[in-house]
Image: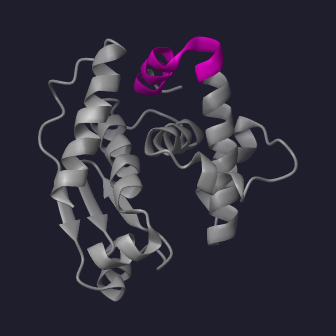
Amino acid sequence: MLSALEGARRDVLGRLEGAGVNTAGLGTTELYVHETTGDFTASTGQPAWVAASTVGRRIESQPTGVLRRRGVLSSTLRHEFVHVALETLGRGRAPLWLLEGLAAHVAGEGAMLARSAGKHRLSVEEIERGLALAATSHETRALYAAALSEVVALIRREGEAAVWRRAMRGG
């Protein structure tokens, strides 16, 4: 877990520095790996299908074995470290659609999310509202897929560095 988190940190810091973002204020990251899924859900309030949860610099994850069985250990930590960086350095200003889309992009979740993509394109406002209210894993994955699609389109138009800067200043 620690090795995967360190790799995620190096990658995200490199992307941020490439975008001209000052990363000096990032500080340390706390990773708490729960012993059981029940412990994870009780501590975070998240449903059992969620792999991890981040608040500020603290990542709480499902047990290592659960993440390995699901095949998402590395991608989960990459996704969550984007949350750490944007919440800490960007002071949580990024809208949910941009935060989740950028996290999915960095984590390489495109192929996994493509299976959940909806047939109709949603506006960023619809994605934002949906992410705030999503109640099922299917609904959440479809909204993550829509957010990722928007971020990929932004990256094509503006470049990844510009998208990081946009996320830092709040959209």
Name the residue: 63% across, 61% down. Answer: 140
Q: Residue at x 79, y 42 (%)?
A: 122
Quadrant of the snapshot with the C terminus = top right
Query: Where residue 26 sits: x, y (%)?
Result: 18, 33
Q: Is residue 53 above or below residue 114?
A: below
Image height of 69 relative to 107, above or below: below
Asked whether 165 falls inside the magenta stretch, the response is yes
On the image, the x and y values in percent for residue 54 come to 33, 56
Q: Position of residue 98 (x, y in %)?
A: 55, 36
Question: Left or right of 157: which side holds 91?
Answer: left
Please tell me whether residue 153 is drawn above or below residue 96 in the rendered image. above
Look at the image and tell me whether residue 8 can be seen.
yes
Residue drawn at 21 percent across, 61 percent down? 1
Please tell me which residue is depicted at 23% across the width and 50% down the height of the picture: 5
The stretch of residues the image draws in magenta is 155-168
- Residue 82 falls within the magenta-colored stretch: no
- The image quarter in which residue 36 lies: bottom left
Left or right? Give the position of 25 relative to 120.
left
Is 127 positioned to the left or the right of 89 in the image?
right
